[in-house]
Image (tube, grey):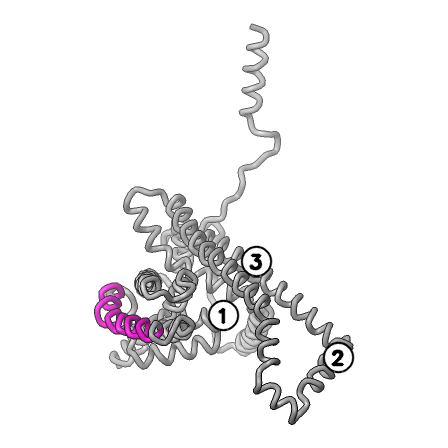
Amino acid sequence: MAVANVLLSAARRLRQPLPGAQPRIRFEMPPEHEAEPGSEAPFGSPGPRMSAQHPLYMGFMGTVGVGIALLVYWIGSNTTQLLLWIVTALFITLGLDPVVRWLERRSVPRAAGILLSVSTLAVAVAAFFATLIPTIVQQVTQIVQQAPKWVQEFIDSEFFRSVDSQFGIRDRISQELEKFVNNPEAMGGIFGGVVGFGTTLANGLFGALIVLVLSLYFLAALPAMKKWGYRLAPRSRRARVEALSEEITGSVGNYVIGQAAVAVLNATFAFIVMSIIGVPFATLLAFVVALLAFIPLVGGMIAGFLVTIVALTAGWQTAIVFAICYFAYLQFEAYFISPRIMQKAVAVPGAVAVISVIAGGSLLGVLGALIAIPTAAAILLLVKEIFIARQDSR
């Protein structure tokens, strides 16, 4: 009984809060309850604003505006890589959010839906690299093993002998190789290139991890982030801002999901054709086709030409058969598959789509080409609903 009393007393003490402990302050995004127009705010009512025509106000605000612009430029120029990671994570978030909401409508908790969606994406990316890296290592090893034989065959050929007898190429090559080996700067450049490649690979892996973590956080906080953003708009325009924002984010999400479905179908068809006609490295090339198919308009064409070139190693007949089948599929996809899959996604005129893809690719590379069409669609929607509507009302 004494032991039981001691245990009960210890349990009661553990349940009591520590002396001086306070509950953790939680930041609400946004505050759940808005103050009524006639009610007293907890920090008092704001006073009247200074007149915008006051010289002191104009000078101060002009100086502040220039300072903020310079600060934003400095931050942007020094955090370019971080901004690209954030944009990539937001793009992935908007693409996975429709999947998460679809799972929520089927009684799956949002946390479980986020974990399932991001895990599926991570497994797909890991499968791509798990297929890509061993194939590259195998092919490079084969090239290194066969390179001495190819060089010796070229040296023993009649063409090289005739050229060497006229121009002395063999002696010239020996002299240049000796100079290169004895040049410390050249050897240092080779070492620096190897180190640079390792650094680039490490930065890429670190960036992928950062994007994955940011995508998790953005997916978890997306509803609260939207509410917070809507609260920044004036009350009279908040409903319109919310409607336009939901339309834009929904269109971007539908575009990403639709483009992913089109890319999977494209890669599946290419893999089946390559397996049937015997194109080498069919699995690796299927992943490459899926990746390029995410780039609208030109991605499929680039993938077709690339695989056709690889298929030439198996014979010109194989290359011709693949080119006919694949480019015929691209026509079928453009007229029958894409219109049905992308019917709820963005609608952008062809000329605007081409210009936006080229401009996005020039500015941000592959990422810019991927987000070019959703960005163009958002700009067109804002121009239609704001600028054109204002012009029509005049």
Q: Which quadrant is the C terminus positioned in?
A: bottom left
The three-letter code of the residue at mark 1 reads: Met
The three-letter code of the residue at mark 3 reads: Phe
What crowding class fits label 3: few (fewer than 14 Cα within 10 Å), some (14-19), or many (20 or more)?
Answer: few
- Identify the main secondary structure in magenta: helix
Specify the quadrant of the image occupied by residue 315: bottom left
Above/below status of 162 relative to 288: below
Residue at label 3? 206
- The residue positioned 34% from the left and 62% from the top of the image is 275
Closer-to-camera residue (335/148)? 148
Q: Which residues are magenta?
A: 319-342
Q: In the rendered view, does 140 fall on the left or right side of 90?
A: right
Above/below status of 76 relative to 86: below
Closer-to-camera residue (123/328)? 328
Q: Gap between marks 2 and 3, in whole Å?
A: 40 Å
Residue at label 1? 50
Mark 1 touches mark 2? (CB < 8 Å): no
> Of marks 1 and 2, which one's residue comes earlier in the chain?
1
Residue at label 2? 178
- The residue positioned 61% from the left and 71% from the top of the image is 148
> Of marks 3 and 1, which one's residue comes earlier in the chain?
1
Q: Secondary structure at mark 2?
A: helix
Q: In the rendered view, does 237 fall on the left or right side of 19?
A: left
| Residue 340 highlighted magenta (yes or no) | yes
Closer-to-camera residue (383/107)? 107
Q: Secondary structure at mark 1?
A: loop
Closer-to-camera residue (349/133)? 133
Q: Gap between marks 1 and 2, in whole Å?
A: 78 Å
